[in-house]
Image: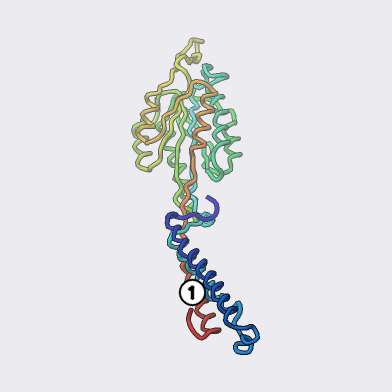
Amino acid sequence: MDGFAFLSPLRLIALLIPAALGIGYLLTQARRRRYAIRFTTIDLLDEIAPDRPGWRRHIAAFAVLLAVVAATLAFARPVVAGEVKEAQQIVVLAIDMSLSMEAEDVAPTRAVAAREAAGVFLDTVPEGVAVGVVGFDGRARLLISPTTRLDAVRRTIDRDSDLGEGTAIGEAVFLALDAIDDAAARVDNEGLDEAKPVGTIVLLSDGDTTMGRPNDEAASEARSRNVPVHTIAFGTDDGFVEGALGEQIAVPVNRQALEQLAFQTDGRSLSALTAQELSQVYEDLGRSVQIEVTQTEVTEWFTGATLALLALAGVASLAWFGRLP
């Protein structure tokens, strides 16, 4: 939001009051001028009142009108965007790096397509969002801590890494949660004037949890920390990899397990069968990441302006006319 806004904009209809007063004042002044010209002569007026206040007689009235305007704006509860505070959004991408990601049902492979699509996410997240990356196979590894330097995150994702045996989805969630907490602690320790950071996990996988802590335990922990886990089930049911003896080993996607993880953490459950679908999913997620903005009410500014203008009107009227307006 740019400029000013009002929490109670309907109250601005009260601006009709100072507008009516201003019009009434102008009409009164015009009427008095006609009467003065009609019933006296300019020469006689100069002899009787040679030191007329002239333009000064309008200062007090003008200040009072501005005070009424300022009071009306204060009544509408103004807020200003220039003084807002932003809560830093922290997103951790958890990417499956198990051997099943070698499947070529998504060209060229699930692993390569996943890395390329993650770049689309980085292209669409708003400026100021901190992104970290967790890679997991039979164990979880923090590849890069959450940072707003998205170029460094992109280089980390693009780096070709070896795939490993096993799938530790639960461990990946626990590690991502710790990464979010550590990033939030850094914000607090640096004394930045920001609201509490908001964390989100985006987890991409094609398989079951075969090692480490179970999904249910990870979901319970994520829920207790108020961190949603958005899951992406990637791949088709026809995917396979070659075993040590050249045999074909089927690696279908376990969508139900990923859907359950997302449901338990109030996250979104998404699915992609192709590289293009995955890019679209990541793009949609990137656009959905928002910077939380709180509006700062500045009613006191206009209240102070009202008092200052009323004081100016009073001082001017006493100085020049010996009375209050």
Vertical placement of residue 107 versus 77, above or below: above
Closest to the observer, 294 or 325: 325
Residue drawn at x 63%, y 89% is 47
- Which quarter of the figure has residue 10? bottom left
Can residue 189 be seen in this snapshot?
Answer: no
Q: Looking at the image, which residue sits at the far bottom?
A: 47
Residue drawn at x 46%, y 66% is 71
- Which quarter of the figure has residue 32? bottom right
Tell me the amino acid under the disc marked 1: Leu
Residue 68: x and y, percent? 47, 67
Q: Looking at the image, which residue sits at the far right?
A: 43
Labels in figure, total: 1
Residue drawn at x 61%, y 79% is 54
Can residue 262 be seen in this snapshot?
Answer: yes
Vertical placement of residue 307 versus 94, above or below: below
Vertical placement of residue 86 versus 31, above or below: above
Closest to the observer, 198 or 143: 198
Residue drawn at x 38%, y 42% is 226
Residue 83: x and y, percent? 52, 57
Residue 296: x and y, percent? 47, 57
Using residue 213 as the reference point, say whether residue 114 is left or right of it: right
> Local crowd at mark 1 within 10 Å, few (<14), some, or many (≥20)?
many
Closest to the observer, 141 or 20: 20
Dot 1 falls on a residue whose secondary structure is helix
What colouring style does the render use? rainbow
- Which quarter of the figure has residue 123? top right
Residue 274: x and y, percent? 52, 21
Q: Look at mark 1 in the image and give the residue it sits on.
A: 310
